[in-house]
Amino acid sequence: MDNKYTLSVIARKLSKLQSGRFVTEDTVWNWVRNGELQVERVPSHVQAWGKYPYWTDEAHLKVVLQGKGYNTDSIFA
């Protein structure tokens, strides 16, 4: 089974990767709204998902981030 990442975890990982550039959950949510990032609702029994209750599979996330120019090897090392 593929790892799942919530929008808040994605934002934290990207912010950590790019020192001096803060990536917010709202930025990641805009990718969802624009149809770039496909997500599913986090089940109600899962806690600590942040501002938006959605997550995505690691494989899909890597493809999206590579398309945006991010180095996924350093993000998911």
Image: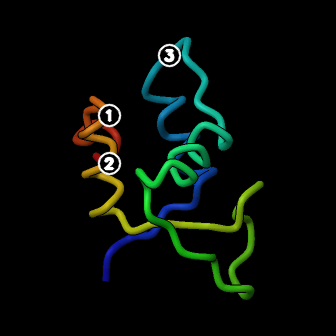
Horizontally, residue 13 falls left or right of residue 53, namely left
Amino acid type of the residue tagged 1 in the rendering: Lys
Residue 7 placement (x, y as % from top left)? 59, 54
| The label number, if any, that marks residue 64 in the structure image | 2
Seen in the image, is 26 located left or right of residue 77? right
The reply to whether discs 1 and 2 touch (Cβ–Cβ < 8 Å) is yes
The quadrant of the image that shows the N terminus is: bottom left
Relative depth, front residue between 33 and 60: 33
Disc 1 on helix, strand or loop? loop
When the figure is inspected, residue 52 is found, relative to residue 8, above or below; the finding is: below
Q: What residue is at 54 percent from the left and 75 percent from the top?
A: 40
Q: Amino acid at mark 2?
A: Val
Tell me, yes or no, whether the two marked residues, 3 and 2, touch with CB atoms within 8 Å. Answer: no
Give the residue at mark 3. Answer: 19
Q: Which residue corresponds to the image point at 54% horizontal and 66% vertical from the top-left?
A: 55
Q: Is residue 39 left or right of residue 23?
A: left
Amino acid type of the residue that numbered disc 3 sits on in the rendered structure = Ser
Q: Estimate the spatial distance between the alpha carbons at disc 1 and disc 3, rounded to whole Å.
A: 17 Å
Residue at the spot of label 1 = 68
State the colouring used for the structure image.
rainbow
